[in-house]
Image (spheres, grey):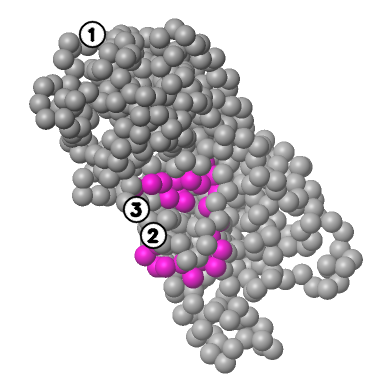
Amino acid sequence: MSKRTQSTTMAIANTFAFSGIEAVPVEVQVQIAPGQPALALVGLPDKAVGEARERVRAAFAAMSLSLPLKRVLVNLKPADILKEGSHYDLPLALGLLAAMEVLPRDEIAGYAALGELSLDGSLNPVAGVLPAAIGASAQELGLICPAGQGGEAAWAGRIEVLAPRDLISLINHFRGTQVLTPPQLAGVAEGRPCPDMRDVKGMETARRALEIAAAGGHNLLLVGPPGAGKSMLAARLPGLLPDLDPGCALEVSMIHSVAGLLDGGRLVMRPPFREPHHSASQAALSGGGHRARPGEVSLAHRGVLFLDELPEFPRQALESLRQPMETGRTTVSRAAAHVTYPARFQLVAAMNPCRCGYLGDGGRECGRAPRCGEDYQNRVSGPVLDRIDLAVDVQPATAAELSHAPPGEPTAPIAARVAKARQIQAERFGADGPLCNAEADPHTIRLAPDAQKLLEQAMDKLRLSPRGFTRTMRVGRTIADLAGADVVGRVHIAEALAFRHRMPGR
C-alpha cells in the first residue's frame, strides 16, 4: 500500500467520484490556517456534499471534539468535476482529523474512504463501494467503508479493507488501542425463484421461441389477447439462462452497487430480470435524473428487460431504447458531463393486438376493428420493432388443454440445451469475442448456399432492412447451434424468417 508524503500545512484524504461505474479519484485536501473561524468547502460540491460539514461537526461533538478556532479550507480535487452524494462525509472527517493531528497524516493518505456519517458518529451504507474498492486497488490504496459493506469491498481482491461501525472505532484502530477485524467476502446473491416451464401447456411455438431467445440472447416480442400467457412465458425465461461468468458478474454487480441495489454486498451471479411498469419515464428506463443514476436498461445488463404492455409506454421512453439495443451502452448527457453505463440487455416485450385486446375475435373485438389494431400497433415505431428478432402470436389455451393436456417439458432439460448452445458460442467466439449470437459479427456466420439464397429472396419479398437481414442470420445461427449443426442451413433460416414474419405491421 503506497504512502504519500503530506505537506506540513495540508492533510489529504482520498475518495472517489463516480462517472457511470468508473471510480474517479478525488483528493480531499484540508488546510488549517489563521483567520476568522470557518469551515469552507470548495471543489464543486452538490448540496449533499455541502451538508457534510454539519454532519461532521455533530459527529465530532459526539466524540467531544471540536473544530479549531481557525479558518479551515477543504478543497475537493479535481475542482472541475461535480461531487455528488453523502459518501464524502467520511473522507472529509478523516482529512480534518489528520489536519488536526488526531490521526497520522501519512497513514490516512494510504487509504481511500467513503461513508455517510450519522450525528452520533456511526457510519451508514453508501452506494458505489464495489467500484470504489476496485479503484482503490488500482491505485494501491486500502479502503475504509461502513461495517455493513466490508464484505462488498472484499470482492476487489488483495486490498486492505477497514470496515468500522463508527468514527471512534476507526480512530482507535489508527491509534493502536483497537484492532478492526478484516471483513469476510459477502458471498453470492441468490437468484429470484423462477416458475417452471412444465406449467406451460401447449403453446409449442411460443415455447420454441423462448428457447431460441434464451440460447442466443435474442430480443423477443409476444403478441396476444389478455390472459393468453404472455407474462407467464416471460417470467420463465430467466430460469433458462445460464449463470453469469465472473467478468460479467463483476460488471453487473458494479452497476447495482452504484445504484445502491447490491443486496448485502453479495455478488450477482444470475442474469438480472427487470420489469418496469409502463408508466416509467425515459430517465427511469435509460438512466438520468438529478444524479444521472443507472436506468432499467443498465440494471438489466447481461439479463432480461421485460416490458409488459409495450405500446402503453411513453413513446419517448421507447425511442430511448434504440441506441442501447444496438450498442450495448447508454449515455446520459448533462450540462456538466456525459455519463455512460453498460446496457447489454435482452428485451422481452408483450403487447395486445389492439387497445381492447381482442382483435380477430369476432365475438369480443370492438367496432373499430381492424383500425383499432393498426393505431395501437403504430404506437411502437418501426425502428424499435426492427430491433426485435423474434415475434410470436400467443393464443390462449382452450379449456380442454388446461384440464387434460399433459404438463409441458420442464425447465431443466431446456436450460441444459440452452447451456450447451451457449457453450458452443463461447468456443466459437473465444474469450475476447461476443458472449452470444445476438452480438455476433455477421461475417463470422457461415450459411449454406441454399440458406443464403433463401435469405436473399426473403429480403426482397418481405422487405427486410439490412438490420433485419443481419438479425435473421444471427437467429438462424442460434437455431443451428441448438441442432448441433456447424453450418446454418436452409431449414434454420426458414424457421428464423417464420418468427420474423410474425412481427406486427407485416
Q: Is residue 412 above or below residue 368?
A: above
Q: Residue at x 38, y 47 (%)?
A: 293
Q: Is residue 255 visible to us here?
A: no
Q: Is residue 111 above or below residue 233?
A: above
Nearer mark to the viewer, of 2 and 3: 3
Crowd band around label 1 with a 10 angstrom C-alpha radius: few (<14), some (14–19), many (20+) = few
Q: Is residue 182 visible to us here?
A: yes
Q: Nearer the viewer, residue 479 or 493?
A: 479
Distance between the alpha carbons at the discs numbered 1 and 3: 40 Å
Position of 257 compared to 421: left or right? Answer: left
Distance between the alpha carbons at the discs numbered 2 and 3: 10 Å
Position of 28 compared to 313: left or right? Answer: left
> What amino acid is labelled 3 in the image?
Gly
Q: Which residue is mark 2?
A: 282
Quadrant occupied by the N terminus = top left
Q: Secondary structure at mark 2?
A: helix
Q: Secondary structure at mark 1?
A: loop
Q: Residue at x 37, y 65 (%)?
A: 316
Q: Quadrant location of residue 464?
A: bottom left
> What amino acid is labelled 2 in the image?
Gln
Instruction: Please tell me the numbered disc located at residue 5.
Output: 1
Q: Is residue 153 magenta?
A: no
Q: Which residue is mark 3?
A: 289
Position of 345 compared to 73: left or right? Answer: right
> Which residues fall within the magenta stretch?
292-317
